[in-house]
Image (spheres, rainbow, N blue to C red):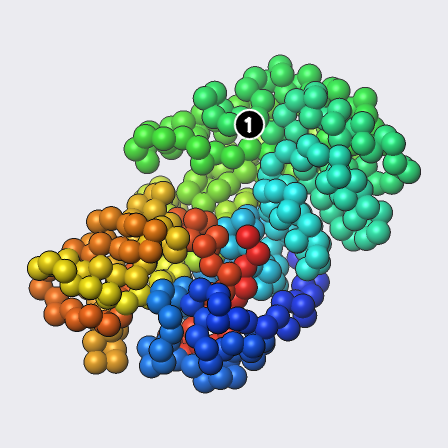
Amino acid sequence: MRGPSEERHAVLDLTTLTEHKLSSTSKGVPDVLDGVTVAEVPMRGLNLLKQSFPSPVAVLRESAIRANIDLMRRYTQSAGVELAPHGKTTMAPQLFDMQLEAGAWGITCATAAHLRLYRRFGVPRIVMANQLLDADSVQFVARELAEDPAFEFYGIVDSVAGARGYFDVLSQLPQGRPVNLLLEVGAMGGRTGLRTVDEAAAVAKEIRGMAGCLRLAGIEAFEGIFGGTPREAEVQVAAFMERVSEVARRCDFSETLQEIILTAGGSAFFDQVVTALKGIRLSRPTRLVLRSGCYITHDHGFYAAALDRLRERSAGTDSVFVGQSFEPALELWTTVQSLPEPGLAIVALGKRDVSFDLGLPIPLMHLTRGSPVSIRGRAEIVRLNDHHGYLKFNGLNLAVGDRIAVGISHPCTTFDRWEYLYVVNDQYDVVSMVRTYF
């Protein structure tokens, strides 16, 4: 197995993003920032706790983001693996740039639109952890490979029909670099991916006959689909990864490869993936690539619990997670709109603003006399409408207009509700602004 890459990635071209002008018609943008460019925002001397912002606003704590990026970098280096974080979590090129600068091997995408956006900003290596089926997008990949010799692309496939879809398009184009494909392994009852070793070997054989257009470059899987308790899921993940290993041993990879890519590893079980895949010995060196995306902001709910369990699995080892943890970086600040009943506050925060698929928002702080004071355990959001949250509280002195900070569970489905997020320091001074592209 090869260790993490020591190459230095090119800085992304963020010029068009930073020159973009804000509009106060966008969520969370006050009039004082109307017409201001993204690059000019930190020059306005704003502080989230001292100035008035339309509620709600989305906030990223800079110190937590940097700490999370550094912790994952140290983990992948110590484990001898690479990281291609899933960009769908944030869809924020500025954060991609930070991840690449910290040594990320590439960025993972999920859709053809993601792929085009990544290339617009110059992402040099892309893993597409989804199947690319339309001719227009396959042609786009071929053009990018032809126009940029430094660009690397890895798509996935789980059927002969999928491979032929690529081949039918590429065979009609001038011959260029072959497109790298990763054979996807799936779980029974899950989503995409080959279910048996024999099926996988048959697709691998078919791709071998398409040399010149396609190249089987490795194996791809996603282990984060199992339900049940954390311990029940762990057992299923271990069995699944054993089958992934078996597929890798049985497949006939392209003879032109210098290394074979093995990639899995979401944000909950990546340690199990490392344990399972590092032991594989194939005909050529392997490069193990994790694809965790949520680590960059972490959360206060689902992934916080998953990391607690990962740390339990790491007990007695030299894992960097034995003594350290990711930090929640994403907060939403809102305002008390109404106190219609004793112990109930209606806050300006709803389904249009925050994730609720893996748990409701968690009240964190109450801005009291200019300072944020913890309200963990004394308040709970019990229900959401489109733009209203039902906050039950006990022992708090709340008033209409008071400001409340909440944490989230599952960052992927909070980021996609925001075009702009304020990056703040530990004093809540606005130090930059992140723009997303959902």
Which residue is disc 1 drawn over?
Answer: 192
Place of residue 336 in the rendered image (x, y in percent of width and height, measured from the top left): 24, 66
At a point 46% along the width and 77% down the height, the residue shown is: 31
Total number of numbered discs in the rendering = 1
Place of residue 12 in the rendered image (x, y in percent of width and height, measured from the top left): 67, 63
At a point 56% along the width and 78% down the height, the residue shown is: 36
At a point 64% along the width and 33% down the height, the residue shown is: 131
Q: Split into 4 quadrants, where in the image is the N terminus?
A: top right
- Other-residue count near label 1 (Cα within 10 Å), few / some / many at <14 / 14–19 / ≥20: some
Place of residue 373 in the rendered image (x, y in percent of width and height, measured from the top left): 22, 71
At a point 39% along the width and 53% down the height, the residue shown is: 352
Quadrant of the rendered structure where residue 328 is?
bottom left
311 or 97: nearer the viewer: 97
375 is higher (above) or lower (below) than 189: below
182 is higher (above) or lower (below) than 45: above
Badge 1 element: loop
Place of residue 274 in the rendered image (x, y in percent of width and height, measured from the top left): 51, 40
Q: Residue furthest right?
A: 174
438 or 296: nearer the viewer: 438
222 is higher (above) or lower (below) than 369: above
* Residue 216 located left or right of residue 420: right
Q: Residue furthest top?
A: 198
343 or 219: nearer the viewer: 343
- Amino acid type shown at disc 1: Thr
Residue 193 in view (yes/no): yes
* Residue 118 located left or right of residue 340: right
Residue 393 in view (yes/no): no
* Residue 306 located left or right of residue 175: left
